[in-house]
Image: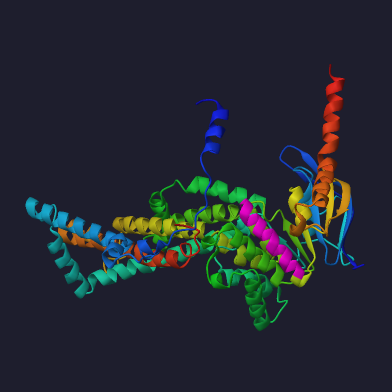
Amino acid sequence: MPPVLLEANGVTLQYKTPRHLVTATYQVDFSVHQGDRYVILGPSGCGKSTLLKAVGGFMPPVEGTIRIRGHEITAPGPDRMMVFQEFEQLMPWKTVFQNVLFPMKVTHKFTRAEAVARANAAIEKVKLTQFRDIYPHMLSGGMKMRVAIARAMALEPDILLMDEPFAALDALTRRTMQQELLSLWDQLHFTVLFVTHSIEEAILVGSRILVLSPHPGRVRAELNSSKLDFTNVDSPAFGAMSKRIHNLLFGDERHRARVSEEATP
Amino acid sequence: MSDPKEHSVSADLRPEFEIEPTDSISIGDVERPLSFFVRMVNNESVQRLAILLALIIIWELYARWLNNSLLFPTFTETLGVFWGDISNGVLIDRTLTSLRTLAIGYAIGLALAAVLTTFAVATPIGTRILTTLTAMFNPLPAIALLPLALIWFGLGTPSLVFVIVHSVLWAVALNTLSGFRSVPETLRMSGRNIGLKGARYVGLILIPAAFPSILSGLKIGWAFAWRTLVAAELVFGVSSRSGGLGWYIFEARNDLDTATVFSGLFTVILIGLFIESVIFRAIEARTVNLWGMQR
């Protein structure tokens, strides 16, 4: 079995809104192994994005620890590159090429020549070579997302953190992007932690799925889905998995609703 | 007709079909370059030149019809005085005096604005201080401080610089701060993600991201400063030899030399137009327009 890369132990996360102290997740444990396509799945309000921010180092847990390669995460760092849902993550004042090059230049992880070569290779991988010298505002949503992915991958982080990266795209583009992400993974076998609220996307993209229950987020299940992908979307196994997750997420709710209906005459 | 079932039945009655896309060669090129004339008419500078030309023609016609050079000299007469004063060096000298004072005031204003905004971005109390000061001083016309400046600094360049600094500082600081505040959270996070902190974070992420606001602050600051300077110079010349453009206008008015007054105003406008539509326009074209942050 590949070694454990990222480990969360009893992570409780809280954040303040102007009126409330919100507990986003409660004592969540999970571990991501090298080469995993690890998906965190849950309905809105299960704290999955907050959890990803904590892994990114933007938010310290009030309880528990998150470790990467054995070191506790205390601050943001280029070993955990994030890809966000919003297109604003790209710098509008830099071209596609400059955007991809920028993190490598800032972190000095590679020499100048190496960085340029890596940036070009990453842009080539996401099929944007002909848009290399164009500014982000001239790109479509899907292309902007590809730039963000290329930028993150070019830096060769220990783990790629993706926060609902395809949620703002139209359905057709989303499907293409999911396929492209999988084909990139087939070539490079990077480790990715992927947050989504779509059951289908979780099964397609993920090799392992962490299901969280809402308010606050607690671990509900951890499932294997590495054998389910685009080739067997219509298979009974895919449908069964989808139903199983659906029941995990909404089963108790329906049950609870029925109980409360019976309780109130 | 209102029955939804009937609709679906009628849809089923119509046959389905699939066709290959037709050859689109009959419309010619899908992308066709516009003709030279159309591009010229759409060009912003050509349009602005045309407007200027029209204004000049109206001016000339009206002045000729009025035929009173004490009240309203013609464009050609003004141009004559303008050329005359440029070739004998008076106007150039006056303009340079004004621009020099302006440059000093503008630079000090920008430096102070940078210090104040840095302080405001770094600490919450700094933000309160800056927003309060701006709310107090921004509505105060800089020229209203001139009498006070004269008491403090006497007749001379320091008084002018003081009022210019006042007119630049608040506009620039306010715009820069609001620019910093409106940098999207995702962009901030992607900057911090790659380990940027402190001055590098401000220089590499915040300033470029806030650049549209900073630039509009610079433009407003420049316009305030230029206006204030000319107005202040109208009140006093540093000395009759080395006064600025405002003093040039004031002297000419005392001599009832309206054509020279016009030529002074003409210079003020020309410099304003030049800075605005050549210098700032060029900066915009190379930055915010290119980046698609402003249309």
- x 48%, y 48%: residue: B137
Inspect this view and state whether residue A264 appears. Answer: yes
Q: Does the magenta stretch include residue A171?
A: yes
Q: Which residue is drawn at 83% across and 23% down?
A: A261
Residue B119 is one of the magenta-drawn residues? no
Determine whether, in the image, residue A229 is placed left or right of residue B175.
right
Q: Taking A250 as reference, is B115 above or below it?
A: below
Residue at 65% x, 76% y: name it.
A121
Q: Give the range drawn in magenta.
A: A169-186
| The N terminus of chain A lies in quadrant | bottom right
Q: Where is residue A192 in the image (x, y as percent from the top left)?
A: 78, 62
Q: Which of B110 and B232 is in front in this view?
A: B110
- Seen in the picture, residue A184 relative to A85 is either above or below; the reply is below
**Furthest residue in direction right, as rendered:** A1
Front residue of A116/A235: it is: A235
Which color scheme is applied?
rainbow
Residue B122 visible in the shown view? no
Residue drawn at (17%, 65%), measured in percent from left and top?
B79
Compared across the picture, whether A172 is left or right of A187 comes to: left
Classify residue B222 by image quadrant: bottom left
**Which percent across, then down, holds residue A63?**
88, 50
Residue A94 spot, x, y in % from top left: 56, 68
Left or right: A118, with B176 as reference point:
right
Residue sticking out furthest to the top:
A265
Prevailing secondary structure class for the magenta stretch in the rendered image: helix
Considering depth in this image, is B55 or A71 the residue closer to the camera? A71
Q: Nearer the viewer, residue B239 or A84?
A: A84
Q: In this view, does B66 lie to the left or right of A148?
A: left
User: Which quadrant is home to the C terminus of chain A?
Assistant: top right
